[in-house]
Image (tube, rainbow, N blue to C red):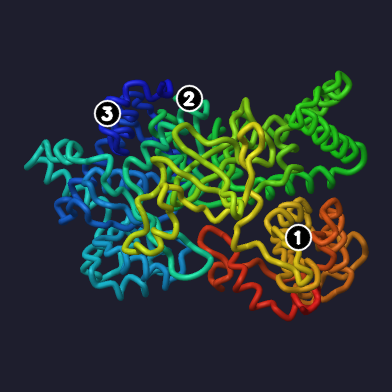
Amino acid sequence: MIAENLIGFENLPQTIPHYCFESFRRHNKRDALAFKVGDAWSYLRGDEVIERVKRIAMGLAALGVKEGDRVAIISENRPEWSMVDLAILSLRAVNVPIYTTQAVEQIRFILENSGAKMLFISGKKLWKHAENAIHSVEHIEKLIFFESEGIPAGNSRALALSDVEKKGDEFTKIDADAVENSLARIQSSDLATIIYTSGTTGEPKGVMLSHENFVSNVVAVSKGLPIKSTDRSLAVLPLSHIFERTVFYVLCSNGVSIHYCAAFDQIASHLQEVKPTIMTAVPRLFEQVYHKIVKKGKAAGGWKTKLFDWALEVGQDYWSAKDNNNSVSPALAAKHAIANRLVFSKWRAGVGGSLRFFVSGGAPLSKKLSYAFWAAGIPILQGYGMTEACVTCANRPDDNKVGSIGTPFEGIEMKIAEKDGEVLVRGPNVMRGYYNNPEATASAIDSEGFYHTGDVGYVDEDGHFYITDRIKDLFKLSNGKYIAPLQVESLLKQSPLISQPLVVGSGRKQVGALIVPDWDALKEEMSAAGHDIKRSREELCEDPHFVKRIQKDAVDLTRELSDYERVKRVYLLPREFSIDKGEMTPTLKIKRSIIDEKYSEAIDEICGAS
C-alpha cells in the first residue's frame, strides 16, 4: 500500500528529484513554493520550479560540477535553498548544508572536511559572518550569491545565482537532453547529502544520507500522517536541519503548498497571512506562544481574566480525561464547549484559524502545554528523529499519547536496549555512516544494523515510545541518585517567568537550576509588586526578591517529583545562553559541560559542593 498522493510514484526511480519533479508536474499548483518580498507574497508554479531547477543544474554543470562533487549552502529559508538543493541532487552531486548560526571555525571545518567545490550564500549578511572561514578554503572554486547585491567587490570567485541560470540556458541550447540524461543516471544508493551534526562535544561529524534514506522516509511518513495535496504549510525551521529538510521532501512529494519563513520574528504575521493547515515546529515556539497567550489573558483584568483562568483549568481537565482514556462527563464536555467558543477560538485564530495539526520535534513538550493546545483545538503531534536516521516516529491524529514520541513509521524498527535503556533504530532511513570517520560509524551502528541514538527511553504496552533524556546528559548526585535533567526542565518551562532553565547538580548534594528569566514578564510582575526594576539585569539577578520569585515557580512546578529530583534553589542569569559564546549548538542544544565549567561556583552555591 502507498499513500494516496504517491500512487504511481513506486514506478519512478527512487530518488528525491524524481519524486519532487513528478509532484510539481502532477499538481502544478500556482503556489507550489511561496515567499514574501516586501509586503506581498510571490508564488512559483510547479512547472516554473522545475524549469528553474533545471537551469541551475545545467549552470552548475557548465561551471564544472560533476557527479560526486560536494556543493555547500549557507542561507536562511527561501525558495532558492530548495531549488539549488534539487539542482545539486539532479547532477548526482552532494549537498552540504551549513547552519546560518554556525561558528566561523565550524564553517571552516565543514568546508575543509567535506571538500566542497562550490558554496551558495544568501547575501551580504551571511557573507560578512562567514567571510574569514571561506577565504582560507582554497578548494572552493565558486561563491554563488542568491542576492546579486551581496557579491563582494573584486572577488573573482563570486557570481550571482542569476548568472548560473543564464549559463544553464546556454548549456541547454547545446544539449537539450542534458538534464534528463543526468536524472536517468541517479541511483537510490547515491549519496545525496552530508549533514554535519552540531554535537555538544568535539568536532562536527558528517552524516552521509542517500536518496534511499530520504525517499523511504517520504513514503513512510506519507503513509503515517494524513497529508493532503490541498494543504498549506509554513517552513519556519531551518532547511539546513534534517527535520525541516525531510519535511520539505515529504510535503513537496504530496503536493503541499510550501511557504517560506526566513526569520522567527516573522512567524506571527506569516501565520495570519498563510493560514497553514499543517506545520512543523519545536517546543520553544509553543512555549513562547503559550506564555504570550497567558500573559495577555492575565492582563485583561476583571471578569475576562477569571474567564481565561477558568477556560485554562477546564481545558486541562478535559484533555487529561481524554488522554488517559477516561470518559468525559457531560458536565465537563459542556464546560469545554463554552470555553472553546469564548476563549479557545481566539487561540486558533492566532495561528491562522485553519491548522489541522502541528508536528513537534527536537525536545520534550510538557503535558500542561500539550493539553492546553489540544483543548484549544490545536493538535500537537510529538515526533522523534535525528540527523542519522531522519524522522523515525510520531504520534498520529487518531492515536496520540501526550508525552510520548508516538509509534515508528512503517518499515522502521525501534527497540529499547536491555542493558541501559538506550533507544535503538534500524531501517532504510538510517545513514550510510559518518563521512571519512569509520571509527565513529562503527561505534554508532552495531553489527545488527541498529543505530544507537544516545537517548534513554521506554516503550509502553501500546507500542508508544517515550524519551526520558540523553545518556550523556544524565548525571548523578553525591548521594548516588540519577537525575534526568530534560524532564525537570520541561516542567520549569511551564512558568511564564522562565525563558531558559538548565538543571544542574552533577556530583553535588542536591538539584538546582540556572535560570534565564523572561525579563519583560518578570520586571512587569515585580514592578506591580512595588519593587525597583530600574537597575541592570546583573543587579536584579542578585536581588533576593527576584531570586525568590523565580525560585517559588521552580519549587511549585517540581513539587510532584521525587524529593531528590526537586529544584530547591535557583541562580539567575542576565542573558540567554548563546551560540557565539560556545554555550549552545547551532540547533540550540545546550553544551552542558561548558556551562557546568563556566558556572561551577554558582552551581556549588545552590547545589552544595561535593
Which image quarter holds the N terminus?
Answer: top left
Instruction: Tell me if 354 is positioned left or right of 426 in this view.
Output: right
Looking at marks 1 and 3 on the same chain, the residue that comes earlier in the sequence is marked by: 3
- Of residues 169 and 185, the one nearer the viewer is 185
Work out whether 366 lies above or below 439. above
Q: CA distance from mark 2 to mark 1?
A: 41 Å
Total labels: the figure holds 3
On the image, which quarter does residue 151 sit in?
bottom left
Which residue is located at x 38 percent, y 41 percent?
Answer: 214
Instruction: Give the amino acid at mark 3.
Output: Leu
Give the Cα distance between marks 2 and 3.
20 Å
Question: Could you tell me the amino acid type at mark 1?
Answer: Asp
Residue 12: mark: 3
Q: Residues within 10 Å of mark 1 (few under 14, many from 20)?
A: few
Residue nearest the viewer, comparing 358 with 267: 358
Secondary structure category for the residue under label 1: helix
Residue 194 location (% of width, % of height): 35, 55
Residue 265 visible in the current orientation: no
Residue 564 location (% of width, % of height):
82, 62
Task: Identify the disc placed on residue 520.
Answer: 1
Residue tagged 2: 228
Which corner quadrant holds the C terminus? bottom right
Mark 2 or mark 3, earlier in chain: 3
Residue contact at pointers 2 and 1, CB within 8 angstroms: no
Query: Of callouts 2 and 1, which one flags the residue occurring earlier in the amino acid sequence?
Result: 2
- Residue type highlighted by circle 2: Lys
